[in-house]
Image (cartoon, rainbow, N blue to C red):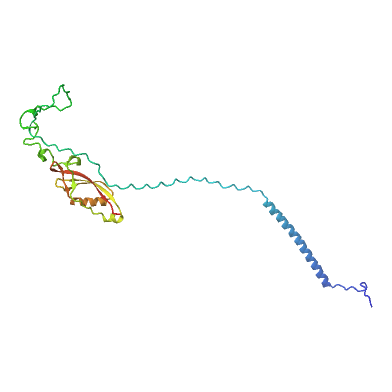
Amino acid sequence: MKMKLLESTPRKQKTTGTTIFSVGFHSALLFFAIYATARAGIREDNEQREQKVNFVKVKPAEPPPVEEKKPEPPPPPKPKAPPKRTEHTPAPLPPAPKAEIAPPKGFKALEAPINIPTTIPTVDLSAKVTNEADFSGKGAVGGSATGKEGSSGNKEGADGGVDTNKNYAEFEVEQQVNAISGLVIPYPEGLRSSGVEGEVLAEFVVNENGRVEASTFKILSSSNPMFTQAVKKALPKMRFRAAKIGSTNVSQVVQQAFVFKLDR
């Protein structure tokens, strides 16, 4: 058996190409090592700069001003309920005064007292002064010196002191005007379809024949012009019993409410 020693093995000689390759490879490896080392220093320097910038103390932003709450507006007032409709009822009139009847032309008769006073009566200075002419003894007994010739004291009309050319108020007559038959005033169709109700307060004169004098028609209040026209058109067709003083027909001023109400 043969032993082969290393020292006895002859060394192979390196070729020129291998040497060039080895030098180039190591040069490139050295270059990349230097480049990597240089870049690492730059990155570390940049990181340090970024860290310094991040740690700069910045003044904190002021909080936005707090807006004051405006007071809430008060709630709107509740709508008032419409007043309840009531029928127009005129106030009661005072009793009508009696018409003055012209006394007859004559004189007053003295009557003997039934109870004779035992003391002197007091004098009423506010009493009407006695007219001597009323005790002349001429004319009809119980009459007056200023009475009308031929009057019996109970006549009516122009001879009895009633002025038939005057328009009397309700409280001046003995018997007031009243409708003979209830005339229904036509309801305006436009207002009926819309469900509108209302009232008209009118003033007019009813003459001694029981007819309305159209020229005296006057509106005191009205809720709608269409209601006014309906009343004005219907009044001439209405018939009334004329007002009276005694048994004499006279003209009377009338104030009447016409209510337009729908059947619900």
In the image, taking residue 233 as reference, residue 103 lies left or right, namely left
| Most distant residue in the left direction | 138
Q: Is residue 192 visible?
A: yes
| Most distant residue in the front direction | 115
Q: Is residue 214 visible?
A: no
The answer to which image quadrant residue 207 occupies is top left
Q: Nearer the viewer, residue 167 or 170?
A: 170
| Most distant residue in the top direction | 119
* Above or below: residue 258 compared with residue 135: below
Residue at 83%, 72% (x, y): give it.
16
Give residue 119's position: percent from left, percent from top. 16, 21
Give residue 172's position: percent from left, percent from top. 18, 39
In the image, taking residue 261 as reference, residue 150 lies left or right, namely left
Q: Nearer the viewer, residue 24 or 161?
A: 161
Q: Nearer the viewer, residue 22 or 229?
A: 229
* Above or below: residue 27 compared with residue 201: below
The answer to which image quadrant residue 48 occupies is bottom right
Q: Nearer the viewer, residue 55 or 76?
A: 76
Quarter in which the C terminus is drawn: bottom left
Give residue 182's position: percent from left, percent from top. 20, 51
In the image, taking residue 9 as reference, residue 138 lies left or right, namely left
Question: How many numbered discs sit on the rendered protein?
Answer: 0
| Most distant residue in the right direction | 1
In the image, taking residue 30 as reference, residue 109 lies left or right, namely left
Residue at 77%, 61% (x, y): give it.
34
The answer to which image quadrant residue 24 occupies is bottom right
Quarter in which the N terminus is drawn: bottom right
Give residue 189's position: percent from left, percent from top. 26, 56
